[in-house]
Image (tube, rainbow, N blue to C red):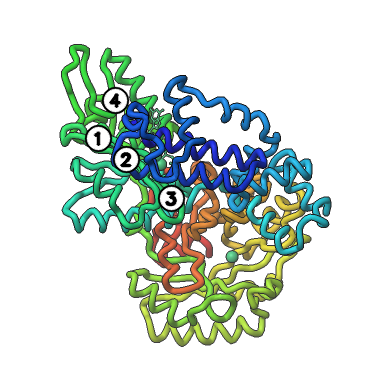
Amino acid sequence: MRNAEVADLLDRLGDAAEAAGEDRFKVVAYHRAATSIRNMEEEVETLWERKKLEEIKFVGSGIARKLDEYFRTGKLRLLDELGAKVPQGVPELVKVPGIGPRTAYRLSHDLGVTGVADLRAALESGRLDEEFGPGVRKSLLLSIEKFQSFGSRMLLPEAEGVFQKLEAYFGALGISVRMAGSLRRGKATVGDVDLLSTDDRTMDALAGCPAVAQVLEKGPKRTSVKLEGGVQVDVRVFGIDELGAALLYFTGSKDHNIALRNLAIERGWKLNEYGLFDAEGARVAGESEEGVYERLGLQYVPPELREDRGEIESAREGKLPSLVKLDDIKGDLQMHTTWSDGSADLEQMALSAKARGYEYIAVTDHSMSVRVANGLTEERFRRQWKEIDKVNEKLAPFRVLKSVEMEIKSDGSLDFDREFLKGFDLVGASLHQNFGQDAERLTERALKALSHPEVDILFHPTNRLFGRREGNPIDLARVIRTARENGKMLEIDGEPRRLDLEDVWARRAAQEGVPIVTDSDAHATGELNNVAYGVTVARRAWLEAGQVANASNLRDLLKRFS
Ligand code: DGT
Ligand code: CA
Ligand code: CA
Ligand code: ZN
């Protein structure tokens, strides 16, 4: 079936024509013909053999001639010629969301922009002020930041949502699908959604799903589609006795796979997506992942650890950690209420947390210098404490801890003095202002807070925000050392755009003996769910419950920072 291949060719031709500054109507014609061929029943190659290409809807004599050249020679000269005409910066610029081939052409050809970094510099320096109004400039800058920090990946909850919808869709048809890929490993961002099944009907079912915008590829054992909204989904079908090996292979990571395959090779065996085979080619495992690990002499490796970061060695020695679970979490230590920038009041947050089975929460409204978030003064905190006392009486033994997300100001000083801070049960500190400082200044601010006797936790240490900005360039090795020396805790903020600390750094902090807090940073009751994402990061950081401060009960928690 060459229809998909020919359709892609025409789409590429359309993009190249647009990027080379060709007429709009030509560009549209190529894409129209591509869609028409992609969706037709008959083989385009058969029609070509019968000289009937022009009977295809939207294929005129010009496009028919090009397809004829392609079928005869396997090449299309026009594509190469157009490619040579595409200005230097275009291929990179079109990857930025919101920049199409036409704009890219204009930027590169007419305005001399050589790439994404150059575009950013040009916008920031005012070089393009005459070309674009302030609104367009602002949205271009936002797109660039998103592209530079994020690419075309999606956040974990979005990928999970796609999976759940598809799982329900297939479920209604009696088809069961399994999650694989980076989504199953719980990565903070996910490129595409990978599914596996043992049911041949899955292919047609996916291609026929109403949420599908475009079928990219459809074969007997594999289908790829793009959903409305742009998310790519890959489905592959395997036999029941192959499913474990397939899950292993398509869960990845690629590096983990390669390490496993090398273990098989050492024994003179072979491992691929169909199974584990001995030297004679007989299948020794493949039905389950557990079976494959076992025959390779390994403990079962949870998907979150499959990154080739030492898990193979640990599994061989039987020393994999017993990873923390969502169930282990006894309370949530960062959230906001209507006192600052949250949307639920304090009692609602407490009730919702209690209903989740927690023993305690810390209410961490912002302190006064975060004016945009309606930060609290000493006087307002004193009033909030009275409300907390009342709620605690009502909900006992559930406990609301008096806490704060206190601002570390530009000069490293804090919003409140030591005497006042003593009135809180728990003090978290973070910075929201002046990220433009150099790495040394930013690091000094964090270290100053971690050296303060009343501060207990440093919240979201790097301040990264997927889709908005990369993390601050602070010296995390020094942050961790200072936290350890002063007996402070570091946070994994479960807000999906933050997930900060990230896994490798949280792991390192815990290895050095720093207790980790993993919480929601909720600004509404529903967002208390964010803790699950924080726990996923903690698992990817190899953490056991004993290394997570809020996996302990209230008494032990209070002991940690009294
Ligand atoms: P993503 O989608 O970019 O977030 O990351 P993944 O890990 O889901 O990667 P994806 O979707 O390209 O492929 C799914 C899995 O398939 C990947 O984790 C490992 C496996 N895989 C893909 N390509 C290769 C390869 O060239 N060699 C091996 N050994 N495995 C591969
Ligand atoms: Ca994937
Ligand atoms: Ca994939
Ligand atoms: Zn915050």
In the image, is 66 to the left or to the right of 41? Answer: right
Closer mark to the observer between disc 3 and disc 1 = 1
Tell me the CA gap for discs 3 and 1: 22 Å
- Say which residue label 3 marks: 231
- Say which residue label 2 marks: 223
Considering depth in this image, is 215 or 62 the residue closer to the camera? Answer: 62
**Disc 3 and disc 1 in contact, CB within 8 angstroms:** no
Considering depth in this image, is 19 or 135 the residue closer to the camera? Answer: 19
Above/below status of 191 relative to 459: above
Q: Residue at x 49, y 57 (%)?
A: 496
Closer mark to the observer between disc 3 and disc 2 = 2
Q: Position of residue 22 (x, y in %)?
A: 64, 41
Tell me the CA gap for discs 4 and 3: 27 Å
Closer mark to the observer between disc 4 and disc 3 = 3
Q: Cβ of disc 4 within 8 Å of ligand 1? A: no
Q: In which quadrant of the rendered image does the N terminus lie?
A: top left
What amino acid type is highlighted by mark number 3?
Answer: Val
**Neighbours of disc 4 within 10 Å: few (<14), some (14-19), many (20+):** some
- Say which residue label 1 marks: 220
- Say which residue label 4 marks: 272
Tell me the CA gap for discs 3 and 2: 14 Å
Q: Position of residue 458 (x, y in %)?
A: 59, 58
Q: Quadrant of residue 552?
A: bottom left
What amino acid type is highlighted by mark number 2?
Answer: Thr
Q: Residue at x 46, y 34 (%)?
A: 64
Identify the mark nearer the N-term, 3 or 2.
2
Considering depth in this image, is 558 or 165 the residue closer to the camera? Answer: 165
The disc placed on residue 53 is none
Give the quarter the ligand 2 occupies.
top left
Q: Quadrant of residue 33?
A: top left
**Disc 4 and disc 1 in contact, CB within 8 angstroms:** no
Identify the mark nearer the N-term, 4 or 2.
2
